[in-house]
Image (cartoon, rainbow, N blue to C red):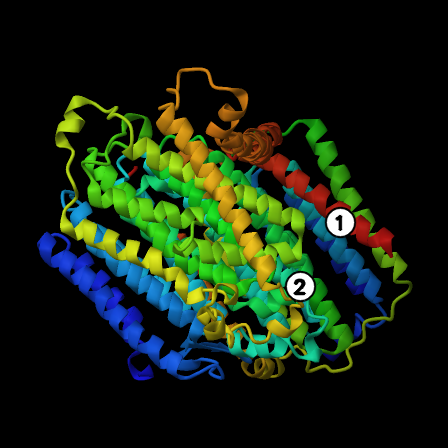
Amino acid sequence: METLTKTIQGVPLNHYILLCSIIFSIGVIGVLIRRNAIVIFMSVELMLNSVNLLLTAFSVYRGDATGQVFVFFVMALAAAEVAVGLAIIVMIYRNTNSVDINVLNRLKW
Amino acid sequence: MSTFYFIAFLSVFFSILVITAKNPVHSILYLILTFFTFTVHYILMNAQFLAVVNFIVYMGAILVLFLYTLMLINLNKESEPRKSNLVKIVGVIAGACFLAVIVAATKTLGTSQPVVLNNPGLGLVKNLGKILFNEYLLPFEISSVLLLSAMVGAVLLATKDTKTA
Amino acid sequence: MDKYIWLIPILPLAGFIINGIGRNTLSKAVVGFIGSLMVLISFGISVAVFFQVKAAGSEFHGFNVSLFNWFSAGSVKISFSFLIDQLSAIMLLIITGVGFLIHLYSVGYMKDDAGFAKFFAYLNLFIFFMLLLVMGSNYLIMFIGWEGVGLCSYLLIGFWYTNPDYADAAKKAFIMNRIGDLGFIIAIFLIMVVFGSANFADVFKLASTKDFASAPFTLITILLFVGAVGKSAQLPLFTWLPDAMAGPTPVSALIHAATMVTAGVYMIARSNILFTLAPVTMHIVAVVGLTTAVIAALIALTQTDIKKVLAYSTVSQLGYMFLGLGVGAYTGAFFHVLTHAFFKALLFLGAGSVIHAMSNEQDMRNMGGLKGKLKITFITMLIGTLAISGIPPFAGFFSKDEILAHTFMHSTPMYVIGVITAMFTAFYMFRMLFLTFYGKFRGTHEQEHHLHESPPSMTIPLVVLAILSIVGGFIGRPESLGGHHWLEHFLAPVFAKSAPLLVTPELSNSTEITLMCISVGAAVLAILYAYFKYIKNAHVPVTDTEERPALVDISYHKFYIDELYDTIIRKPLDALSVFFYKVIDKMGIDGIVNGLGRGTVDASKGLRLLQTGNVGFYIFMMVVGIISILMYILFKA
């Protein structure tokens, strides 16, 4: 274990931020360019996880475990969100026979 | 050190595949891989508890749930109607702008100190458990209520509406 | 005795409550009996109180009867207490005495009216408030009575409210009184601010001390006077009183001649020290009083309605009283209140008797020749007319001459105008008498057939009042005529503080007698002129459709004052209201409110097009928004 953790020695914090930003942006792009509700949902998960990773990095950097506790809560939230979100998607599919978000254009007026 | 960059590269690579794969099932599989690289990141930072939770909850539970849903609605074919190229380009540009802004923000912070694990026991279950059940007992209990209500909500939403159906 | 003083106002109140509650169950006889009895008992107690006050001598400054603490706020304590001194003792006698006679008269006069019990209830209530007004030991109690009598006046003017004109007259009286009341209440506040008390005793004691030399006496007294102007029907608020004749005749006699309208005089006489300290106000009071006296007398010259003549006569006589107050003749003014209460109540009741006999005819053009048929009424009214005309030895002569003598000392032109007004008074009163009782009967045959003398319940008060009108003046017989002016000595403690401040040159007896001769001569001349015009030439005022000479026309139409008020006050107010309604309210406020609503709807109609309903578009806009916010934060730093 010790040798494993040694491998991150010397990685600047900025690189963690950079990595998480890139993955977060990929999530954003995924949300923007895909029309499949499930894929969009997966992109959202990607964003959530990138933030989790960054929180952990900060936690380690500052030597404060609170960040990791927070990640734990985010995960609990994500689990709840996924359950409800997927239920909604199932319902949408049942009603419209599609998970294409462009079909959901009745969300106006 | 190079291990980190290698794993980071894998993370970015798989996450790009997630959003570009035509078949949603492939997307999910790439997502599992992405999350696996995340687990490795956690291990590298000696956040053992998070690594395990990530492995079990995300890869094991949530993504399986995705797969189940996909299976339920039978959408494994590559029949997704494509967005027009213009929308794609605009989407990518917007994402790139987003990235650029954050990178610029990071740059203004100047050079940063390397991440050094001063306290190896930081991310261990013992340590986190103490914090969780001392300072964060109330949020922890409340999150249980949240999960319960999410469960009830999911059941309620996914059940066929007998009145209308 | 002071233990029973609270009974004086309470008894009429009890009468009001009993008659008010039992108005549908009690018989008319019982109602009339209760109503009159209550006032009679009050009168009895008042007489006892009067003699007690009289026995107390000239050093007596009245006693306070404190009933309970009304309210206290901070340093201000207002107790519900009565002040019984010479002034209020005499007022008590007038109110309960004349009030009782009028109650008695009403039993006969109103006997066929459906609202008999209601009428007596109101009358009793009026007596209660009037007693409160004169017995109050501070301005606030006085104000309760002041407002209460205004209310009763309103109720009784509009007694026959089914006639819209009468209801309008009631409203007019009420509103005009409100204008005055506003002045009065501001004056009360001002008094409380300046002196820290509304108690008569405290205020008057402080007012004459040096500490309050710079107090705003002029402002206070002018505001008090505004209140008096409204209540006592002086210019420019006098037009309600003639219209108030819409009420039953006993009401006109009691409220609009003998008691309520003299409340203003009483109030000023009570506050005499304040007025004495404000010479400017005194001049205003005198000028307003004199002007009112002249104008009302001029209008009365040509009126054809018997009650209207008396109403304008009342206004004119009230003008005299204010003239008296204005020139510092407080005793004289109050003396006139007293004698006026006798003879004007007598005249009104006599007129009521005539109207009763004429089957509710009020137009003198349709009367005439009633002398033979209504003997008692005629004789008593003749006495009343002589009294008001200032013919010795009737009551009006003494009081009017005292006022005129003081006016002469004050200013000769005012005196001349006063004497001319007295001439007018004699003329129009005898005109009324001649038109009503002399000549040929001009009414319908049916009316002639019905002519009858009134029942005893109506004639007895007439006789009593006639006797009072004859002898009432002797209580103020001046020294020049061998008297010693008992009233002046009796009232001296009330005006004690003002007396040293009023420098009045002593009038020699010969001058005083000369002045009397002048005014009596003028009155006799006027009577002779009236005699020649209306008896020798049997002149009858023309009907409404015929042309009149210009001056007569102006007088007949009351100087067009109502029309003038209509034009300069009511119409602009109406126009202003219409303007506010149409422009400010409809266009302005409604415009803003409706405009906001319409604007929101229109803007929403445009904005909702932004909502495509496309979830992808929403997500895209969200990302754009997040980027914008991040960039803003980034570039701000």
Identify the residue at image location x=26%, y=36%: C162
Q: Which mark is residue C629?
A: 1
- Residue C312 image point, x, y percent: 44, 41
| Residue C297 shown left or right of residue C124 in the figure | right
Mark 1 surroundings within 10 Å by alpha-carbon count, few (fewer than 14), some (14 through 19), many (20 or more): few
Question: Residue C373: which quarter of the image?
Answer: top left
- Residue C468 image point, x, y percent: 32, 59
Question: Residue C246: which quarter of the image?
Answer: top left
Residue marked by disc 2: C278
CA separation in Å, label 2 and label 1:
76 Å
Identify the residue at image location x=69%, y=68%: A56
Quadrant of the image containing the N terminus of chain A: bottom right
> Depth check: C542 or B150 in front?
C542
Query: What is the number of callouts on the image?
Result: 2
The local secondary structure at tag 2 comes to loop
Looking at the image, which residue sits at the far right? B110
The three-letter amino acid code for the residue at tag 1 is Ile
The three-letter amino acid code for the residue at tag 2 is Ala
Question: Residue C442: which quarter of the image?
Answer: top left
| Residue C5 shown left or right of residue B96 in the figure | left
- Residue C83 image point, x, y percent: 42, 76
Looking at the image, which residue sits at the far top? C546
Q: Earlier in the sequence, mark 2 or mark 1?
A: 2
Instruction: Name the front one of labels 2 and 1.
Output: 2
Mark 2 surroundings within 10 Å by alpha-carbon count, few (fewer than 14), some (14 through 19), many (20 or more): some
Identify the residue at image location x=30%, y=73%: C47
> Depth check: B142 or C609 in front?
C609
Q: Say if residue C248 shows up in the picture.
A: no
> Depth check: C444 or C369 in front?
C369
- Residue C626 image point, x, y percent: 72, 47
The local secondary structure at tag 1 comes to helix
